[in-house]
Image: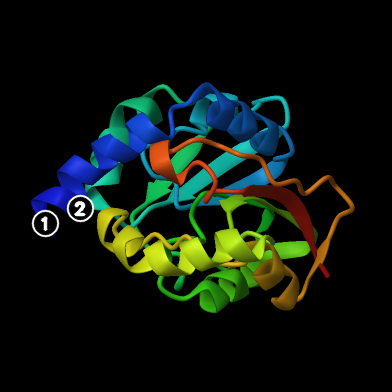
Amino acid sequence: MGLYSETIFPWLLDKALGHPNIMARRRALVSGAVGEVLEIGFGSGATLPFYDRAKVSSLTVVEPSQGMNRRAAAGLAQSPVPIRSVPCAGEQLPFEGGVFDTVVCCLTLCSVRDVGQVLAEVRRVLKAGGKFLFLEHVLSDDPDRQRWQHRLNPIQKIVGVGCNLNRPSAHLVQAAGFQLEPLPAQEVEYAFGALKTLTPLVMGAAIRV
């Protein structure tokens, strides 16, 4: 594990994603979580304050990065809901099938190694009728922006430790066998300096059928 990926990058990511617009969207996303909840790609725990103990009976979080888990430790000790942390990747979840009411994924599908496998695992561990809540930056619908996303993606994958600018994550969720709810899945311009036009966000809920 390198100094950049496990120490510098977790700090940079927290700074970049601590913007009030992003935090407001995290809050909106997590407000839909109920029952036994799993969050994949927990990172340093930015969503944690937004879980509602009146609706969430327990929270399990998974994160493969040692650096992120170190940064999350203090927050875990002050969790508003009963919580357990499992240091693993989303491609191979160590849980029985059909045990969670909700799975949350926030700005994570962009950087996993195998999106299809992660979504298959999410579907496996969800109960029938359970919800998959996701917030992701995605491939733009605009051809000009798409070209720039494709051009800059090799650089982004290095700087962002595997993060991709050009994944059509909402379409991949639907292709994995989920039924998307008719919630507003909207693109929102969010500024990462020069990349402000290259990070459209999509937030949605999908049902395990």
Please tell me how crowded label 2 is: few (under 14), some (14-19), or many (20+) other residues with Cα within 10 Å: some
Between 87 and 135, the one nearer to me in the picture: 135
**x and y, in percent, of residue 35 in the image:** 71, 42
- Vertical order, 113 against 170 (above or below): below
Q: Disc 1 designates what residue? A: 2
Q: Residue furthest front?
A: 144
> Which residue is depicted at the point 54% across and 46% down?
197
Q: Residue furthest left?
A: 3
Q: Disc 2 designates what residue? A: 5
In this rendering, position of residue 72 left or right of residue 125: left
Q: CA distance from mark 1 to mark 2?
A: 5 Å
Give the amino acid at mark 2.
Answer: Ser
Q: In this orientation, does residue 13 appear?
A: yes
In this rendering, position of residue 129 left or right of residue 78: right
- Vertical order, 5 against 58 (above or below): below
**x and y, in percent, of residue 54 in the image:** 71, 25
- Is label 1 in contact with label 2 (beta carbons under 8 Å)? yes
**x and y, in percent, of residue 16 in the image:** 38, 34
Q: Classify the position of the N terminus by image quarter.
A: bottom left
Between 84 and 66, the one nearer to me in the picture: 66
| Disc 1 element | loop
Q: How many marks?
A: 2
